[in-house]
């Protein structure tokens, strides 16, 4: 069962980005960008702070890995919350991350994923999400987490204009208000932004300062 609110959110996203937009392909592009960025991580980097409040780079990477495996399991209809548990990062952080990222890319590339139902116990156990909406959640996470990793490492991240246009639509559909203040909320309250960068606009909508760490 899906709530009326969730259905309206999904329709708003799909209508705004266009029915022909391939969310699975965009998600894979975002995740592959994150793989490239994480390939530069060294053991010494793991203790660095990140734009994600209270997370070092080690904590961020273990979260990202857990999310990849969790979303991949959800794409197969598996709703066990234990499948979202944090995993040991391993001696080679970049390789641990790459394996998880490739796993979710392969899972989402299966036929019919956008039409499937996804149990997402980290979001709610009251209902399941459509595949299209679940992929949109994962997509916006990995646009933003790519930015998080890049900022942590002092690197830049480049996405093409089409991907950023779709990501902006998804970011604008993320619920705001008091939900952003709840413990464990995925995103902090929106930050005012007036620049020209679409990526900076996206991260500001989702509670990151485009000028982090300032």
Image (cartoon, grey):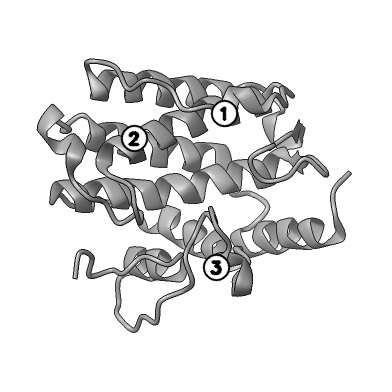
Residue at the location (57% across, 22% down)? 107
- Residue 169: quadrant of the picture: bottom right
Q: CA distance from mark 2 to mark 1?
A: 14 Å
The circle drawn on residue 84 is: 1
Camera-nearest residue between 46 and 6: 46
Q: CA distance from mark 3 to mark 1?
A: 23 Å
- Residue 46: quadrant of the picture: top left
Q: Secondary structure at mark 3?
A: helix
Question: Which residue has dot 2 on it?
Answer: 61
Residue at the location (10% across, 33% down)? 44
Q: Earlier in the sequence, mark 2 or mark 1?
A: 2
Q: Earlier in the sequence, mark 3 or mark 2?
A: 2
On the picture, is 63 further left or further right than 128? left
Q: Position of residue 136 (x, y in %)?
A: 59, 48
Question: Which residue has dot 3 on it?
Answer: 181
Quadrant in which the C terminus is drawn:
bottom left
- Residue 6: quadrant of the picture: bottom right
Q: Is residue 212 visible?
A: yes
Q: Please rate how many residues cluster around mark 2, counting C-alpha atoms within 10 Å: few if below 14, some from 14 to 19, many from 20.
A: many
Q: Position of residue 88 (x, y in %)?
A: 37, 20
Q: Earlier in the sequence, mark 3 or mark 1?
A: 1
Residue at the location (20% across, 64% down)? 213
Label 3 vs label 1, nearer the camera: 3
Q: Secondary structure at mark 1?
A: helix
- Residues tagged 3 and 1 counted as in contact (Cβ below 8 A): no
Q: Position of residue 188 (x, y in %)?
A: 47, 65
Q: Secondary structure at mark 2?
A: helix
């Amino acid at each position: 069962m899906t709530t009326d609110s969730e259905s309206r959110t999904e329709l708003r996203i799909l209508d705004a980005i266009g029915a022909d937009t391939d969310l699975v392909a965009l998600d894979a592009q975002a995740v592959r960008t994150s793989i490239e960025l994480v390939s530069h991580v060294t053991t010494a980097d793991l203790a660095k702070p990140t734009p994600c409040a209270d997370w070092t780079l080690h904590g961020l990477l273990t979260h990202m890995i857990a999310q990849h495996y969790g979303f991949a399991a959800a794409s197969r209809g598996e709703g066990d919350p234990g499948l979202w548990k944090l995993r040991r990062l391993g001696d080679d952080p970049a390789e641990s991350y790459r394996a998880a990222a490739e796993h979710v890319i392969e899972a989402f590339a299966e036929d019919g994923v956008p039409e499937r139902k996804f149990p997402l116990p980290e979001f709610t156990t009251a209902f399941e999400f459509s595949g299209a909406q679940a992929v949109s959640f994962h997509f916006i996470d990995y646009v933003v987490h790519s930015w998080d990793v890049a900022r942590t490492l002092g690197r830049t991240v480049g996405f093409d204009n089409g991907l950023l246009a779709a990501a902006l639509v998804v970011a604008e559909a993320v619920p705001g208000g008091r939900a952003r203040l709840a413990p464990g909320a995925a995103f902090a309250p929106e930050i005012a932004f007036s620049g020209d960068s679409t990526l900076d606009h996206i991260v500001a909508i989702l509670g990151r300062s485009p000028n982090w760490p300032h």
